Image (cartoon, helix red, strand yellow):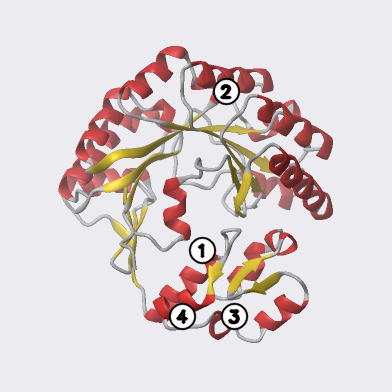
């Protein structure tokens, strides 16, 4: 079997505003950033990647707030293969010609633009700091700057969102030719402001049937535009798939640094302290900084590989899966697999097991049954 190259994830948790839907480890206490960056660089120096990676991903939080010299130091500390994919998540309101030139100069070659919506009432409810017009102009700037690998993130299902508004916004984005589009179905997380508003009856998400119909139309629009649907939430021009995210879906190893960062190495999954202050203090005192360490058994490794592998549109090859993990998918799904096949949520063809389009819309429920 071909050796899978590792990726590297770096978490930059600072945000100007805490968006109502977000449950990632983050803080608006930007005053902590000098200590955090020092702690982060210390972690990378203490535990550098043991082998060269071919992807580096700056996630957040809002990585576009990070000083370019910090980003440059991190890139210098990490061992990378020749011609790596280096991604940074950016907010539209942070995009300027100067910033784009700086990011490009230090080797960043892929941008992930957090548009989230092009409907004004939705952006306001999210607490996003950009307008629809600013989001589109930021994408135009990315194009003019010469970046040829740009992703846009959008969320489907948010309160005040409409099918017509969502699809019109999607068409406007496609006109500007991003190579990659990620559509995330809204998830309500208990610790978020949005969850509390919904629980109190002060906000209501887009009805499920409307979400499903809207997503199906979006798939059609994106396929018609030449973007392949290669993972449940992701669409790309051929050759512009997210190399880093594919690590997660193909059971590849990845190093991870920063508060709340999760790594997967040698069948061990670790998560750093999610609390930013606790992470900083642990690094300053030279203390352990993991809040979770899980050693995967053969069974849990197979289950995770099944769940992540089925997120890919082409699914998994059953023969290869059995040879690699020693389990067949029906061993892990149990009796529910027959039900999913008969109900049209899964399909099996020439030893390839995959979610149907109908199954993709219920992927979280279906895949969690294999845990």
Instruction: Return the residue at label 1.
Output: 308
Q: Distance between the residues labelled 4 and 2?
A: 44 Å
Badge number at residue 322: 4
The residue at 70%/28% (across/down) is: 118
Label 1 crowd (10 A; few <14 / some 14-19 / many >=20): some
Q: Nearer the viewer, mark 3 or mark 4?
A: 4
Q: Earlier in the sequence, mark 2 or mark 1?
A: 2
Q: How far apart are marks 3 and 4 (CA)?
A: 14 Å
Label 4 crowd (10 A; few <14 / some 14-19 / many >=20): few
Q: How far apart are marks 4 and 1 (CA)?
A: 15 Å
The furthest residue to the front: 350
Query: Could you say where residue 267 lies in the image, as x and y percent from the top left?
Result: 32, 69
Q: Distance between the residues labelled 1 and 3?
A: 14 Å
Query: Could you say where residue 232 lies in the image, as x and y percent from the top left?
Result: 62, 55
Label 3 crowd (10 A; few <14 / some 14-19 / many >=20): some
Q: Residue 137 appears in which quarter of the rendering?
A: top right
The residue at 72%/59% (across/down) is: 357
| Res. 98 in view | yes
Q: Earlier in the sequence, mark 3 or mark 4?
A: 4
The residue at 71%/26% (across/down) is: 172
Lateral position of residue 42 relative to residue 339, left or right = left
Badge number at residue 139: 2
Badge number at residue 333: 3
Q: In this view, does 32 lie above or below 368?
A: above
Do the residues bearing badges 1 and 3 touch, measured as CB atoms within 8 Å? no
| Res. 201 in view | no
Q: Distance between the residues labelled 2 and 1?
A: 30 Å
Label 2 crowd (10 A; few <14 / some 14-19 / many >=20): many
Badge number at residue 327: none
Do the residues bearing badges 2 and 1 touch, measured as CB atoms within 8 Å? no
Q: Residue 300 appears in which quarter of the rendering?
A: bottom left
């Amino acid at each position: 079997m071909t050796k899978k190259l590792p990726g590297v994830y770096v978490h930059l948790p600072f945000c100007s505003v805490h968006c109502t839907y977000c449950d990632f480890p983050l803080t608006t206490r930007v005053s902590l950033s000098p200590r955090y960056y020092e702690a982060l660089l210390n972690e990378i120096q203490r535990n550098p990647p043991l082998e060269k990676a071919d992807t580096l991903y700056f996630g957040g939080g809002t990585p576009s707030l990070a000083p370019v010299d910090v980003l440059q130091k991190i890139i210098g500390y990490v061992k990378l293969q020749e011609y790596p994919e280096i991604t940074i998540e950016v907010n539209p309101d942070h995009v300027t010609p100067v910033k784009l030139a700086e990011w490009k100069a230090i080797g960043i070659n892929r941008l992930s633009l957090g548009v989230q919506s092009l409907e004004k009432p939705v952006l306001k409810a999210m607490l996003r700091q950009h307008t629809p017009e600013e989001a589109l102009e930021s994408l135009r700037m990315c194009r003019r700057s010469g970046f040829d690998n740009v992703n846009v993130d959008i969320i489907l299902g948010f309160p005040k969102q409409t099918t017509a508004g969502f699809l019109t916004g999607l068409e406007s984005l496609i006109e500007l030719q991003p190579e990659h589009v990620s559509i995330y179905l809204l998830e309500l997380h208990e610790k978020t402001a949005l969850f509390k508003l919904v629980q109190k009856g002060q906000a209501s998400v887009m009805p499920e049937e409307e979400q499903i119909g809207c997503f199906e139309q979006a798939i059609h629009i994106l396929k018609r535009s030449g973007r392949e649907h290669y993972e449940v939430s992701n669409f790309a021009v051929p050759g512009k798939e997210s190399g880093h995210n594919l690590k997660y879906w193909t059971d590849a190893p990845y190093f991870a640094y920063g508060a709340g960062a999760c790594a997967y190495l040698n069948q061990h999954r670790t998560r750093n302290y999610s609390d930013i202050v606790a992470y900083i203090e642990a690094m300053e005192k030279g203390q352990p900084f993991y809040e979770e360490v899980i050693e995967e058994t053969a069974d849990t490794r197979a289950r995770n590989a099944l769940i992540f592998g089925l997120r890919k549109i082409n699914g998994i090859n059953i023969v290869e899966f059995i040879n690699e993990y020693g389990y067949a998918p029906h061993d892990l799904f149990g009796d529910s697999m027959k039900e999913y096949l008969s109900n049209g949520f899964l399909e099996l063809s020439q030893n390839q097991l995959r979610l149907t389009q109908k199954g993709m819309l219920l992927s979280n429920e279906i895949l969690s049954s294999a845990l």
